[in-house]
């Protein structure tokens, strides 16, 4: 029951975010007349807020009740969205987007900790898969519904979307509270009232870096984030429009197909890969990323079907996402030092966010300079790095754990 409420909470929260995400850039740049710089700065500040909040939220989830951390973060995101309704100056809009990034991301490691506390080892991949699928479905529904109520010709045309997002995050927080406090038989450990002592600051980073498997997991995390997620919203659409010269609606179709494939295949893939090791599946994901970029490169040689190839590549990437999403959090948590699960998840979320923030900048520089093959070649290389990192991670995890040395007995003679 608790895991179902968490899944529902994820879907409802992303429904609200989906209503805002496709329109906030045009709203800030054109509708309010603040220009592209302010609109781009809003997305950047959202990422900065997320980058700051992820490790902090993870640390708090280790030291406090993770359900309470998630609840407060969700309500903070809801308040930020309500603030955007009344934001009539660039400064207040930028502040609202920063606060929204903080609230959304601070809740992420706390929710993962709750899954790890409430769900047994056997079901964790399935639950994380459902969380990812529910989020994708909620975002797709939110974006679709907002298309009927958002009016970018009016200054208040985004008010329904902001209100929907605020309500979505508030309801999501209440569902998490119901799962934590309303479930029968809740124990102190379930609610996180008696966490293990948490190591913080540089000591935490050193403790995490000291685990070889976590170092290679970080390499794979960064490479896979750079290899697709960092380019999903900006780099790939820019490549499609400026290099492949496809129509705008083709880009929208590709994004929609990506969500549809995830929703259709997620549970099938989880069942089919249940007995496969996480590093092996991450190698498969890297291989799928490589195939996707090869398809995108081939579209340059076939302009008559470039649109179809671009859309198909998004479906290919989606297959990889169905493996990536259910694996990474359980794997990272299983490798975390004792008492540092939330901290480790938060730091890895920050790493992913950093990679996703750098991606659009890289795409802008390369595509803006006309270095199309540099853009494609770089991401092919990154995908190959992900495969190599996952292969090395598999080797590290297969190494036998050394047995503890027997106590040393003194051979000295007592006179």
Image: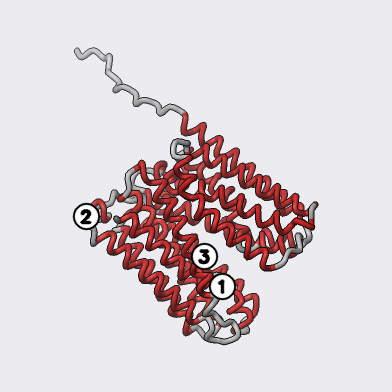
Q: Are marks 1 and 2 in contact (CB under 8 Å)?
A: no
Q: CA distance from mark 1 to mark 3?
A: 22 Å
* Closer to the eye: label 3 or 2: 3
The quadrant of the image that shows the C terminus is top left
Where does label 1 land, which residue? 42
**Residue shown at 45%/80% (left/top)?**
83
- Residue 81 sits in which quadrant? bottom left
Q: CA distance from mark 1 to mark 2?
A: 41 Å
Q: Are marks 1 and 3 in contact (CB under 8 Å)?
A: no
* Closer to the eye: label 1 or 2: 2
**Residue shown at 39%/50% (left/top)?**
127
Residues 341 and 375: in front is 375
Where does label 2 land, which residue? 186
Q: CA distance from mark 3 to mark 2?
A: 34 Å
Q: Secondary structure at mark 3?
A: helix
Query: What label does residue 140 carry, if any?
Result: 3
At label 2, counting other C-alpha atoms closer than 10 Å, the crowd grade (few under 14, some 14-19, many 20 or more) is few
Q: Secondary structure at mark 2?
A: loop
Horizontal relation, residue 250 to residue 283: left or right: right
Residues 55 and 389: in front is 389
Residues 86 and 347: in front is 86
Residue 165 spot, x, y in % from top left: 45, 73
């Amino acid at each position: 029951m608790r895991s179902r409420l968490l899944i529902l909470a994820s879907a409802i929260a992303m429904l609200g975010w989906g209503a805002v995400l496709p329109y906030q850039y045009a709203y800030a740049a054109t509708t309010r007349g603040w220009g592209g710089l302010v609109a781009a700065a809003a997305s950047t500040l959202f990422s900065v807020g997320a980058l700051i909040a992820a490790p902090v939220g993870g640390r708090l989830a280790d030291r406090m009740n993770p359900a309470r951390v998630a609840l407060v973060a969700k309500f903070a995101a809801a308040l930020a969205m309500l603030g955007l309704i009344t934001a009539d100056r660039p400064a207040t809009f930028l502040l609202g987007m920063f606060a929204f990034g903080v609230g959304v991301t601070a809740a992420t490691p706390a929710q993962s900790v709750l899954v790890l506390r409430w769900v047994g080892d056997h079901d964790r991949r399935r639950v994380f898969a459902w969380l990812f699928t529910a989020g994708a479905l909620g975002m797709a529904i939110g974006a679709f519904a907002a298309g009927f109520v958002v009016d970018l010709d009016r200054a208040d045309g985004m008010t329904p979307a902001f209100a929907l997002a605020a309500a979505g995050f508030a309801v999501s927080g209440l569902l998490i509270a119901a799962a934590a406090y309303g479930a029968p038989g809740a124990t102190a450990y379930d609610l996180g009232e008696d966490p293990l002592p948490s190591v913080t600051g540089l000591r935490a980073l050193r403790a995490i870096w000291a685990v070889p498997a976590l170092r290679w997991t970080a390499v794979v995390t960064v490479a896979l984030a750079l290899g697709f997620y960092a380019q999903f919203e900006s780099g790939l659409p820019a490549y499609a429009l400026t290099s492949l010269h496809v129509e705008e609606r083709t880009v929208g179709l590709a994004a929609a197909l990506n969500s549809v494939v995830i929703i259709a295949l997620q549970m099938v893939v989880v069942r089919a890969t249940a007995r496969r090791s996480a590093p092996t599946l991450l190698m498969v994901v890297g291989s799928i990323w490589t195939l996707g970029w090869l398809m995108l490169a081939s579209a340059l040689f076939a302009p008559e079907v470039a649109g179809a190839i671009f859309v198909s590549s998004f479906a290919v990437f989606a297959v990889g996402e169905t493996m990536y999403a259910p694996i990474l959090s359980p794997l990272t948590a299983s490798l975390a030092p004792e008492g540092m699960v939330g901290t480790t998840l938060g730091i890895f979320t920050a790493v992913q966010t950093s990679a996703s923030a750098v991606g659009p900048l890289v795409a802008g520089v390369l595509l803006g300079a006309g270095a199309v093959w540099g853009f494609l070649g770089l991401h092919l290389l990154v995908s190959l790095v992900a495969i190599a990192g996952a292969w090395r991670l598999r080797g590290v995890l297969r190494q036998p754990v050394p047995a503890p040395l027997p106590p040393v007995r003194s051979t000295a003679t007592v006179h």
